[in-house]
Amino acid sequence: MKGHCLCGAIAIEAPDKTTVDACHCGMCRRWGGGPALGIACGSNVQIEGADKLKVYRSSDWAERAFCSECGTHVFYRLVPTQEYFVPVGLFSDETPFEFTEQIFIDRKPSYYEFANQTVNLTEAEVFAKFASIGEGAT
């Protein structure tokens, strides 16, 4: 899959994936003004224009990056495993994405609700799933 930021200064290439997840944790909502809708792209991600990236270490185990020119969110990356979660909006609208999972569902505020049927994981379930990464993303 190929995608790019709003201004085109950063281009990203990742393995083909079709599943989209939503994160409702407090950091993601503060970072983007709402839930983060992303694709788990693994560690095999290429980025062109990396000199335009601004990277912020948001926790002991993760960092977030955005384009320093236009502000587009480019990735959330787990530092220990170098796994990228890339906002779905960077990629083509023609890709047949499927919304499959919501994490930190117990942190989701009451003012919005998705109609899709998804797997829903609580904060405790997320930390149990990624126990080796760390705790405290809220």
Image (cartoon, rainbow, N blue to C red):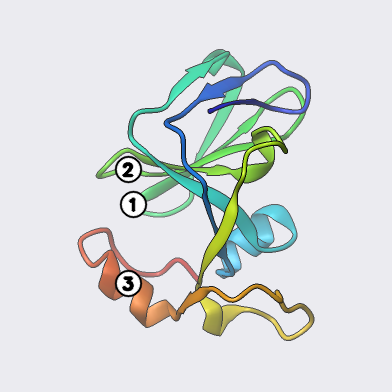
The residue that disc 1 covers is 61
Q: Amino acid at mark 3?
A: Phe
Indicate which disc, 1 or 2, sits on the residue closer to the N terminus: 1
The residue that disc 2 covers is 79
For the point 66% across and 63% down, the residue is 35
Q: Which mark is residue 69?
A: none
Distance (Cα) linking label 1 and label 3: 12 Å
Indicate which disc, 1 or 3, sits on the residue closer to the N terminus: 1
For the point 54% across and 79% down, the residue is 105
Q: Which mark is residue 127?
A: 3
Q: Is residue 138 above or below residue 12?
A: below
Residue ranking furthest to the left: 132
* Nearer to us in this view, 109 or 21: 21
Secondary structure of the residue carrying tag 2 is loop
Indicate which disc, 3 or 2, sits on the residue closer to the N terminus: 2
For the point 53% across and 28% down, the residue is 1
Q: Which of the 4 quarters of the picture holds residue 80?
A: top left
